[in-house]
Image (spheres, grey):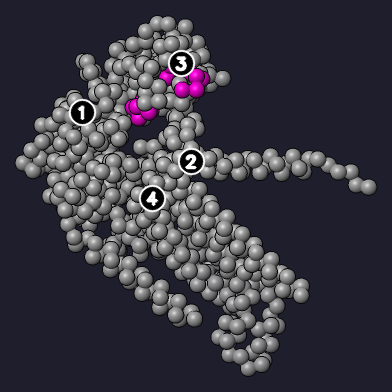
Amino acid sequence: MRKKYKFPYFYLAFISILMYLPFLVVVVFSFNESKLPTIFTNFSFKWYKELFYNKRLLESLLNSFLLGIFSTLASAVIGTIGAVGLAKTHYKLNKPVSYIATLPMMIPEIILAMVFLAFFSLLSLPFGFVTLLIAHTAFCVPYILIMVSSTINTLDKELEEAARDLGASRRRAFIDIILPLLFPSILSGSILAFAMSLDDVVISVFVNSPYFVTLPVRVYTQLKTGVTPEINALCTIMLIICLIGITIYYILSNKKEKHKHD
Amino acid sequence: MIKKISVVLLLTILLLTFTSCNKAEKDQLVLYTWEGMFPREVLEGFTKQTGIEIIYSTFDLNETMLEKLSTANGTSTYDLVIGDDYIIDAVIKRGLAQKLDKTQIPSFGNINPIYQGYFYDETNEYTVPYGAGIPMIVYNPDEIDFDIDSYQDLWDPRLKDSIAITANYRLVNGITLMSMGKGLNETDIPTIKAAGEKLLLLADNIRLVQDDNTQLSLLNGEAKVALLYTSQVTSVLAENPNLKAVFPSEGLGIGIMDFFIPKDAKNAKAAHRFLEYILQPQVAADCFNYLGYFCTTKAADDLVNPNLVFKGEFKGEIMQNVPEDADEQYNKNWIEFKTALN
């Protein structure tokens, strides 16, 4: 009989506490009446009420989601086409191109931010949604490109050939065969890209306009005057949304698995 | 399917660009500063009074603001900016600010003159101060049986292992220099070295060195004395009014935030109106009570939280950038001090 080690359980518990205790603290203190982050005085919904009245904060939350969705969509299209193109063609430049394409992910954000600031000023492009979209798309593309590139080489080439053999046009074969097969990796790349876009401060603070400010910028620029517990309330709400999202995803993927087995 | 998505995408982008263009044509004031500088009622009050909409835009660091103003070359979107003293020096030197039209600010005289006339704007032509920070010593009189009223008192052996200080190397060096009768911006290397040696003697009394939430150590009893920034002093006094906050007798290291109007502001008129509005005693009092910084509008002194009004003879100095070799020595002192703590 195999001896049962207790170590794995301790390890798991330790890591879980280390990672999730801060979340719990945020949730608990979002219901704290006092402004100070260490002493729990009274249970109250005060900060949720404040948050509800803080139009600027809510508007920037909406802006963040809008920007995240659009930059993810744009980079999903560009990244997927790029990955397919790199896999289907055999030019000498393919390798260098695939390295250069991941550059926005490698170079420090602050440098990228300065580059965008200088570039957009040079073009006299007015700062705002468009500049943010371009900048965010630029650093989101690599995530999708890498994800899709890694699966595309494992795909069975004969599937596409079979479709072509049966009379499908190139486009038809791409849309009906390749794209559905790539979809899981496009999706996981997109989720990564969305998360990246949602929490970016460094680049956004340089290329935004007064009329379109994202949530992380609002929160980060509060540091000088002190972050208020409204942010805790907001974090709690977002945490709940994320949990619901993960649960739905889990249920759906479980259903699919079952379908497969049936 | 893909066509449909791309059409929707394009339309939305077009729509968003248009809406942001339309917005700029109304009567608006674009404010550029940190988040959380004004209570909501003050901003809404201005819009109600004048009909001018306020677009509140934020930056994280003074340097970000300077960079954005200097790359804008003539297309600046900002009408009114608040920044710290040292960065305003750079802004004015680079010609990025415009002179105030004082005929449009009849209440200019409401400003407390002790917060005016510093190195960045000696003749008060460009700036209107908005709040000052003065690091102070706060202590718990129940736990300490003698009066602390100077930086020198921090070296008292009775305070062994009981002081909390902020982790600002220039400030900590500065208080040491001031306790020796020197200035905050000393550039003489041997003098700074001597301060470093004196600073080492303070290590025994230090309980913790921390920049954020230093004030909490006074509340949970970890420290008995603390050197704190103004916002920390305000919040700790609100929590425990028994604590005593003192202006050290050797002098003060102050920091001032100021309004200025960028050179190419589109709506300088609205900016002037906002300045006039913010200098009204009641409005100013609301702002400083909310912000927790020292009141720079003298006319509001009677209306504001008394802890935010400076009393007594003012001996203040603003921290400025020093030559590289002096800064290096300051850093060296700091590292040696931190090593001595362990």
The residue wearing badge 2 is: A31
Q: Is residue A189 above or below residue A42?
A: below
Amino acid type for the residue under numbered disc 1: Leu
Q: Which chain letter goes with mark 4? A: A
Q: Nearer the viewer, residue B134 or B68?
A: B134
For disc 4, the neighbor class at 10 Å (few under 14, some 14 to 19, many from 20) is some
Amino acid type for the residue under numbered disc 2: Phe
Relative image position of residue B53 (x, y in whole percent): 21, 53
Q: Is residue B164 above or below residue B116?
A: above
Whether residue A167 is visible to the viewer of this picture, yes or no, is yes
Please report contact status of discs 1 and 2: CB closer than 8 Å, yes or no.
Answer: no
How far apart, in angstroms, are the residues tagged by discs 4 and 1? 30 Å
Residue drawn at x 59%, y 77% as measured from the top left: A179
Look at the image and give the residue range highlighted in magenta. Answer: B219-236
Q: Which chain letter goes with mark 3? A: B
Q: Which mark is residue B303?
A: 1
